[in-house]
Image (cartoon, rainbow, N blue to C red):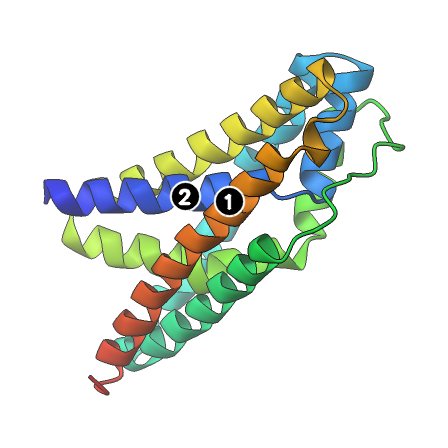
Amino acid sequence: MQQSLIGLLTFGLTLGFSVGIVPGPFIATVISQTLKYNLKEGLKVACSIFITDPIFILVTTFVLSKIADFDFYMGLISLAGAGYLLKMAYENLTIKDTKVDLQDARPQSIRKGLTIVLLTPAAYLFWLTVGAPTIITAYQQHWLGPVAFLGGVYSSFIGTNLTVAWLVSRSAGFLQSSFYQGLIKLMGLAILFFAAVFIKNGLELLGII
């Protein structure tokens, strides 16, 4: 059980770090609010996911848990999740431009964070194909499983966002540094491993292997 919890925590930490470090509208907003105001405003943007994500989690886990032929459909969803992870890994490994748009840095940090999350298709895809299936499978093993997974995801995601924002505030060239780009590609390799795990689990649930 301890190994299982460590594995879920590691998976959550890897996902949170991988999503949090790649340039996009969410981290751009965290950085812009930090640069224009202070780290507290950046924290507000980062923490806005605690308002939106419970909705995603409750809806997706409820829907998936009510599926009649659970193993078959979870197998398909696991393969879909592997596809999503492979897409993430590809984007990390092939990334070249790590610039972010910092032009729009208006106040109302929480509302801006909420808007970005709710209008980003990736958030819906993540919870439907990766997040919710992992939570359901983890809970079947032990109630601490989802806690370990979600704890890893959120601590890593928010910590990464704020760390990047702070580093950018200290050095404008950080986003273009080889170190930053190297981290992104390294996480791409880590995601490839978990994609392989999802493929294996999906094929097992479908009875193929």
Dividing the picture into quarters, in which one does residue 75 lie? Answer: bottom left
Where is the C terminus found, in terms of image quarters? bottom left
The residue tagged 2 is 14
Which x, y percent locates residue 130? Answer: 43, 59
The residue tagged 1 is 18
Left or right position of 168 against 56 = right
Left or right position of 111 against 5 = right
Q: Secondary structure at mark 2?
A: helix
Direction bottom: furthest residue: 208
Residue at x 42%, y 65% (from the top left corner) = 63
Q: Residues at badges 1 and 2 in contact (C-beta under 8 Å)? A: yes
Please state which amino acid type lies under the numbered disc 1. Answer: Ser
- Whether residue 47 is situated above or below residue 89 in the rendered picture: above
Which x, y percent locates residue 37? Answer: 79, 13
- Whether residue 32 is situated above or below residue 95 in the rendered picture: above
Please state which amino acid type lies under the numbered disc 2. Answer: Thr
Q: Foreground residue, 26 or 56?
A: 26
Q: Could you give the CA–CA distance between mark 1 and mark 2, rounded to whole angstroms?
A: 6 Å
Where is the N terminus found, in terms of image quarters? top left
Direction left: furthest residue: 1
Q: Foreground residue, 182 or 66?
A: 182
Which x, y percent locates residue 195? Answer: 39, 64
Which x, y percent locates residue 134? Answer: 33, 56
Residue at x 23%, y 87% (from the top left corner) = 208
